Image: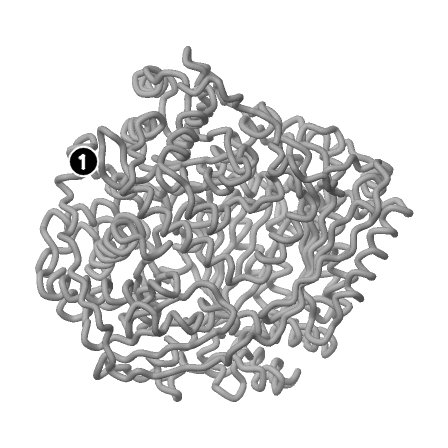
Amino acid sequence: MKRRSYMLLGFFLSLLLTIVPPSGNFTNAAIPTAVTPVSALSFTQGVQKTVLDNGLTVLTKEVHTAPVVSVQVWYKVGSRNEVKGENGISHQLEHLMFKGTNDRPVQFGRLFSALGSQFNAFTSYDETAYFGTVQRDKLEALLTLEADRMKNSLIGTEQLTSEKRVVISELQGYENSPGYRLSREVMRAAFPNRAYGLSVGGTKADVEKFTLEQVRNYYQTYYSPENATLVITGDFATEPALKVVKETFGKLSQRAKKNTPLHNASRAIDNSSASSSIADASPSTPVAKKAPILLKQPGSAALLQAVYPLPDIKHPDVPAIDLMDAILTGGRSSRLYQALVESGLASSVSGGAAELIEPGWYEIDATAAPGQELGKIAQVLQESLTKLQQQPVTSEELKRAKTQLQASYILGNQDITSQANQLGYNQTIAGDYHFIEGYLAAIAKVTPAQVQKAAKTYLNPAQQTIGFFEPTQPDGKPGSSNAGSGRTVENFSPGKPVDPAELAKYLPPATSETDSNKQSLPEEFTLKNGLKVLLLSDRNLPTINLSGQIDAGSEFDGNQKAGLANITANNLMNGTQTKNALTLAKTLEDLGAGLSFSASREGTNVSGEGLSANLPILIQTLADVLENATFPADQLELSRQRALTSLKVQLDDPRGLGRQVFQQAIYPENHPFHSFPTGESLKTITRDDLLGFYQTHYRPDTTTIAIVGDFDRVKVKALLNQVFGKWQATGKPPVLKIQTVPFPQTLTRVNKVIPGKAEAVTYIGYNGISRKDPRYYAALVLNQILGGDTLASRLGTEVRDRQGLTYGIYSGFAAGINPGPFLIQMQTAPGDAQKAIASTLALLKQLREQGVTEAEFNAAKRSITNSYPVDLANPSNVSSIILDNAVLGLSRSEIREFPQRIQAVTMANMQQAIENLIKPENLVIVTAGPGDAVTKGN
């Protein structure tokens, strides 16, 4: 039951662009060879189920590992419940649920932000869910808000009109993706008479026609206690929490629209159609195979998608199906990766089962490598599936697949938000929160014969719906224009900033409880060769999270070899002096562990995770590739082809191209932050280049590693000394002297036209500050007010919420070792781009001239400090924070003292930050997208 992302998030998450049992003896003789049995960790232990008199199902689970709680409300309604003409209404309603209630007629995103909540929502085929995670003292506030909007949402003409524009902007953004367009056509063909064949978000045509009565009726039908599950996890006491639940949710009445069945089967979307569908048929029903769907449209890479019908989530074949998927697509050692990617036919391949309330589907996606034919990929794909049907899988493959699935559930549930999500999903989709335990028990019992039977039953080529996307040259020419100091014509006057006092009256009295002073500090030490290590033991779960950085970033590339750092990082796992690529992959995948490398501007990032019993192997593999990588020539060529495909996709995406043009407009050509890979630079990179870069920049004295999890620090220190002790470097590491970049002298506009796109992306900003800049903490508070939250900030309130011009707008300071950009990013319809830019400029001018109010200032500080404990509740986040602080030259205690540093910011600091960092007359503005985004709205 590998969870696939068949959902639409309601809005962008808030962003700040800143950068059980002991595990045993860590000796070579005692290195474990198998994962900790998953039965050792009960996912539902301590869960209490309560059903209120009004039918609301309540699941509570106390988890006292961090001073935070997560509240989630899952409604059993999604696109499955929609009929013809109302496709997307579930998603539209999800957006409207943030527009306020009769008793609280304010944007709920602002209320959640005031609480310091990390919140969001999503709509999928079978469910719509809302979730927030906060400090434990905010539990009652979250419950009160969720209960209020369950029955009292303010759904009026003004709210619907504004949010329809936002939803259409979101949908048009998806239209920029060829993969989205291909999937839409394949699903329509596979499910022509069922709602599963419709896009979850709907269509622009349907959304434009939604009426107020239509949306209100849908809300009154499906948003009701008996159709919902409330999940609470975290640091709380069950009985007092249930008392609050009964006081808030218990008083809500059941639905008014009782004449409409709640859980009808997926409705026929066009009863007049006499056509049948492969996916509508039983897997054993003989049907004529369909011709492939061929989509020839503007794009950058050739794509394949194949869909096969599956049973529902409760079917006994589901465990075997998921193991079949793991064997086919689970990592580098999987059959399809070896057959398609390692052969050079495809740049990527992935798969997954959509196991839902009703019969779902299995999906395989592949991106063709440059010059490869989709027909050949389809042929090799079918050969691989036929082999799986005709020959039993090996015991090695099945054991690896079982281990991967078991480990993924432990690693995927390390924080309380994920645990609540798992409980809500199981209760809503499978009808039983215990489902996961029976599922995992069944996984352990699956035999090779059962996997082979699943392949024969469900991968029948006659049941297949397959689609090809062949990119074409778009009508019109890509182009650019530099408008110099040109300005938008319109001069929008932004509304008055929201007064936090108006929000406070809808919330309990503000508190600033934080237990960050109790946050454990990592032990820090340096090996004799200069390698820096930070260790933080956490015995709450049998997991390990490893983060690392090597001073080997793309800042060292140079324009002629742009892309060298990333290709070097991507080839580290392609072989060492004692292991080839497949052996390295199996070493980790056999344990359900992972280790990856990627280059950023200021370093190569290391990310690793696994169960604690396997930490020695994870560390040994890391040491092997850092010290002994060989960079085989054949793997370099495959990696180059994947990089070229990735580059084409990036340059065809308004987000990717816009960000590159924006960065290059800020930093001069001789600046290390200016270079980006090109087709020419990637083609010139040789194996000798990789070896030279590796030998020069991969050094112990430029490497930092942070490990958080279940381990014995003494044993880990001994192991690190043992495996890294012989790694030596000579001389001093390379150091770049990076020039200071001034603000642009005037407001500069650059427009990049990408024909064939439906949505525009705009970047606005200039060079910003470094992490150690004394104005950094004031800049964070300033950013929280300006654009740190796409619903609660000034930009979000005006441009998204009031005007409905964008699906998402946010700002941030990319503060690293060196100053990175300050930027504002937004996605708009082509005709709204210039209006949104004009509104943004007016808001920046207002901020520059009028500053912020003391109430805004204090509310922003509370929001940042209140949300910080939520960050610390996730071990993976803690590992990254510890690493970043060390790499940026901050003290070990920064992880504990951060809230105090935010609280210490004064209004005088804020005013200085505004004067120094907000320059409305000196901006670089880059818009990438369809040509009319450049001209419409002027």
Question: Relative to the observer, which residue lies in front, 63 or 117?
Answer: 117
Left or right: residue 325 compared with residue 790: right
Task: Give coordinates of residue 734: x percent, y percent.
Answer: 45, 82
Q: Position of residue 513 (x, y in %)?
A: 23, 37
- On screen, residue 819 above or below 183: below
Quadrant of the frame with the C terminus: bottom left
Up/down of 709 relative to 851, above or below: above
Residue nearer the viewer, 173 or 18: 173
**On the image, which quarter does residue 94 sit in?**
top left
Point 49% across, 53% down: residue: 707
Q: Quadrant of the N terminus?
A: top right
Q: Is residue 306 positioned above or below 759 on the image?
A: above
Element under label 1? loop
Q: Position of residue 145 (x, y in %)?
A: 30, 30
Other residues around mark 1 within 10 Å, as few (<14) / some (14–19) / many (≥20):
few
Q: Residue at x 38, y 70 (%)?
A: 933
Residue 424 visible in the displayed image: yes
Q: Residue at x 24, y 52 (%)?
A: 793
Figure coloring: one colour
Identify which amino acid the numbered label 1 is placed on. Ala
Residue of label 1: 510
Could you tell me if residue 580 is visible in this image? Answer: no
